[in-house]
Image: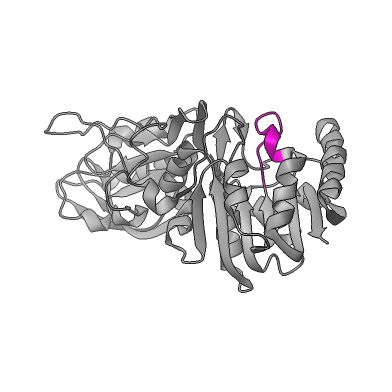
Amino acid sequence: AAMASSSTPPALFVFAMFASTCGVSGLALPSRTRTGSGAARSLVRFADAAPAEPQLFPLLFVLCRREALQLAGLRAQAAAEARLVDGPFVIDLGFTTRQQLLVLPTGVALPAGAASESPCVTWDELDEIARDKRDSAWECEAGYKPVRIETFSEATNRHAKLLPVDNGCPTAVLAGFNMHRMKGTNPVADTKEKLSAFGSLGPSGTVLDVCTGLGYTSIAASRLPGVERVTTIELDPGMVEMQRRNPWSRELFTSPKIERLLGDATVVLPGLHSGAFSCVCHDPPMSSLAGDLYGLQFYQELYRVLRPSGRLFHYIGDPDSKASGQLFKGVGARLREAGFADVKLAKDAFGLIATRS
């Protein structure tokens, strides 16, 4: 999620350029060790000159503990030669169901890698993932040891990791805080509630999503028939790496309806045209991490980029909690001061809905 900082230098990058620059600075990328013959080397994924998409890596998948346990059970079917085994098999943190997998003497691979002698993940590696008490998301690629999907961003000085969720898409843990509501819900339901705050049909027209995070709001909005285009802003290159490595975020990079901007939202927003958006979804981190995104000046910019009668949803937190309850009052007052009318509680979405007069 984006965080405002008055010391952040002006920056506005279209994400198509990010692939060629993310490896330069501001992002601590994982070191990958090749197994088998050949020396260890570092792998900087998606930092080549041409923007690479996740689906261009056919020998790669992502696993959580329960998926690793399922695949580890195939060890009993391993033979001296590679063989296809019928599924179905759930991988990619529940995103993908494979009807067949290739079982090798040394491990498991995708059928696309039938010509490869290297499994995507070995039997010993599957056992290691299955014993993972941190319940991480593991990136498994033919010829490399699995690595946890986590990163440290020098741009924000924060650690982030992808956290698998039962029966749904994963969330991210940023600086120790879950990015989505988890108590009694999941990221899919959380996203649905936010979009439903705009009405039974959700947002329409041109949509601005402030603080991309893993991109679930932008992706869900882009699928709505009434939405023409979604523009989304993210501050942290580390979060972009998480998006790239999360199977559930792939539509951020493939949907023609989504435009991705990288930069400090307090700097990016003044560069956008007045009245450019029909709807704005503002989903900032907690106020202690992103105070400027809760300020009057920022709300005035949100008001400016909305069309007349355009609607704003502002996520805040549980309105029944003491801390968030106090924050609701201050946010509502500042939204009205910025010019917004009809400021109302969207209780199920944990936020406020407002209209540009």
Residue 318 location in percent, x, y?
Answer: 79, 40
**Main secondary structure found in the magenta portion:** loop
Residue 347 location in percent, x, y?
Answer: 83, 50
**Left or right of 61 in this view: 178:** right
Q: Give the range drawn in magenta.
A: 283-293
Residue shown at the point (87%, 43%) measured from the top left: 333
Rendered view: 334 above or below 111: above
Residue 302 location in percent, x, y?
Answer: 70, 52
In the image, 101 versus 137, the foreground residue is 137
Residue shown at the point (21%, 47%) measured from the top left: 104
Residue 16 location in percent, x, y?
Answer: 39, 53
Residue shown at the point (41%, 43%) measured from the top left: 63
Rendered view: 114 above or below 162: below
Residue 272 in magenta stretch:
no
**Left or right of 292 in this view: 31:** left
**Left or right of 189 in this view: 271:** left
In the image, 273 versus 224, the foreground residue is 273
